[in-house]
Amino acid sequence: MRDTLPAVLTLASLREAYRAGTLTPVDVMAIVADRMATSQDPAIFITSVARDELIAAARSLMERHPQPNSLPLWGVPFAVKDNIDVAGLPTTAACPAFAYTASINAHVVAKLKAAGALVTGKTNLDQFATGLNGTRSPYGEPRSVFDAVYISGGSSSGSAVAVGAGLAAFALGTDTAGSGRVPAAFNNLVGIKPTPGLLSTSGLVPACRSVDCITVFATSVADGLAVRHVAEGFDAADGYSRRIGSVPLPAKPRFGILSSADREFFGDDETERLYDAAVARLEALGAQPVVFDYAPFREIAELLYGGPWVAERRAAVGSFIDTNADDFDPSVRGIIESASRFSAVDAFNGQYAFEALKRRTEATWANVDLLLLPTAPTTYTVAQMKADPITLNSRLGLYTNFTNLLGLAAIAVPAGFRTDGLPAGVTLIGPGGSDDALAPLADALHRGAECGMGVARTARLPEGPLAGPDSGDRIPVAVVGAHLSGFPLNGQLLDLGGQLMRSTRTAAEYRLYVLPDTDPAKPGLQRDPGFSGPGIEVEIWSLPTAAFGRFVAGIPAPLGIGRVRLADGTDVAGFLGEAYALAGAEEITQHGGWRSYCAA
């Protein structure tokens, strides 16, 4: 099929093509399959889904959900880092001897697929997610989408290159020390690194389990945020999953910047220039720059690879390294085997040192609301990295390694291009829970850089919703029936400025009924404490605060707005039916939602 897609894929371009009927998910997957087959970089994927299987998956989606854009990620192709499970595909962690075929999807993959997204394949990585450069894999080294002589960044190397090269609209990576931010910078992408615990790590081969994050690579902040909203949510099966409340930021925040003494770009004046330009752009937006002491953050960063946290990488691979040491990349093996020098006493002493350093960082957070840092201080060629793999790799994490240990949120965005045509990036880092509050600033920084998306350096960034579930000027509302995407009353939400945030389910204690004598047909949702059902499909939309009252005022009896408990344990405003109208009504709980009932 003729390739009519833009060079890089966005949610907006796909949704518009689907809405207009110029393309279907079958068409898009055929084009993506062709792009994958003709890619000049053979190291992006470890396992790619075969063309006929991609097309079959798209057909199946259209049969189950025929209405275009009827799911939040309907027909959106995405790639998955190969340390995250996808049912039916091998998980290798870039170590062939370790490989196994996953029987179930990782928690976040399941949520994304349920939202209509289609997996294109499993992407390459630094083995066992140990590295920030992308050269530590027996499956080859993915390269920068701008110059194949240069590294792609890691460890989420293949995921970043897949998005940057237009082979996927978004990709999942992981980020323990910067693995979801550094590759974003090197490929002109956005890297969404959530607050630790916001996205479940069930189904992830751990690197350092206590600080691992699953992350999102996207072409824009709006796209990354939309994907994150679908993927997030509490997971009781993950001991590190957390219910994280939204933390706001001031309208004109104070942002920390590096002092001249703390700056280190290893002679890369061009990346330093782009950092300074980003500082100026953020200041022009009304934010106030504040020079801060980076020393305690840098010392925390050094703990992750130079302290007893290395032993957690040893715990992640278990006895496998004892029997298969020769199957490890030499650099990865050296790092993991170095854990043997740490004792339990060292682990406690490391924790004490960390807490002391954390206390020192509190002085910074008393004076700033967020930090603006270079994502990586410089970049290297593949040859340079292979000649000095430990030293150069450690340099890449200078401004990233501390983030997860401190439980912080971060969004990495493009900052522009060096004169040699290679991109650089900056990262906004905020308190845990500030994920949504960081987004408007990150989006403005990206737009101000005027550097496009991925390989499309001159592309115009798409517009998209940036409001999060608890945004101060918007109110989330759960819709269950005629207001769902593609249904007759959805236009009421759109007319009031409604923005689709994600698709999810209610808690198990809800029943769904068909309301009699309504036009258009509508369901009624009712809570039944003690009942345990499948949960009911809902969409979460956000409305401007000023419009929310008008929306509620127009809801006819016997429907009303109450509090609806979601599957992740949170409560939002949502449609409920009055009990008198549901007595004797047809129960359709077994269908799991209004959309499925109507399709049946």
Image (cartoon, helix red, strand yellow):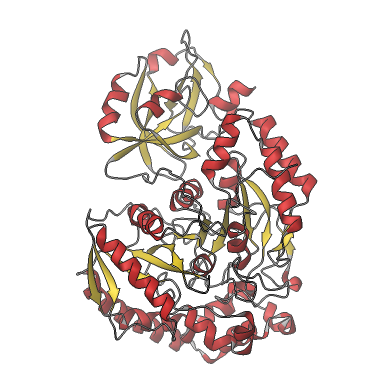
Q: Is residue 548 above or below residue 586?
A: below
Residue 138: x and y in percent read 73, 75
590 to 305, vertically: above or below: above
> How far across and how far down the image is residue 40, in percent?
72, 64
Question: Which one is nearer the viewer's eye here, 391 or 84?
Answer: 391
Q: Residue at x 49, y 26 (%)?
A: 511
Residue sticking out furthest to the top: 517
**Residue 517 rendering spot, x and y as whole percentages:** 47, 7
Instruction: Residue at the far front: name it.
Output: 419
Q: Check the image and report above or below for 62 versus 440.
A: above
User: Quarter holding the N terminus?
Assistant: top right
The C terminus appears in which quarter of the rendering? top right
Can residue 63 be seen here? yes
Image mark count: 0
Q: Is residue 73 visible?
A: no
Residue at 70%, 39% in the rendered image: 27
Which residue is more in the foreground, 396 or 53? 396
Q: Which residue is depicted at the point 44% across and 65% down?
A: 416
Task: State which quadrant residue 98 falls in.
Answer: bottom right
**Compared with residue 588, is residue 415 higher up or lower down, i.e. above or below?**
below
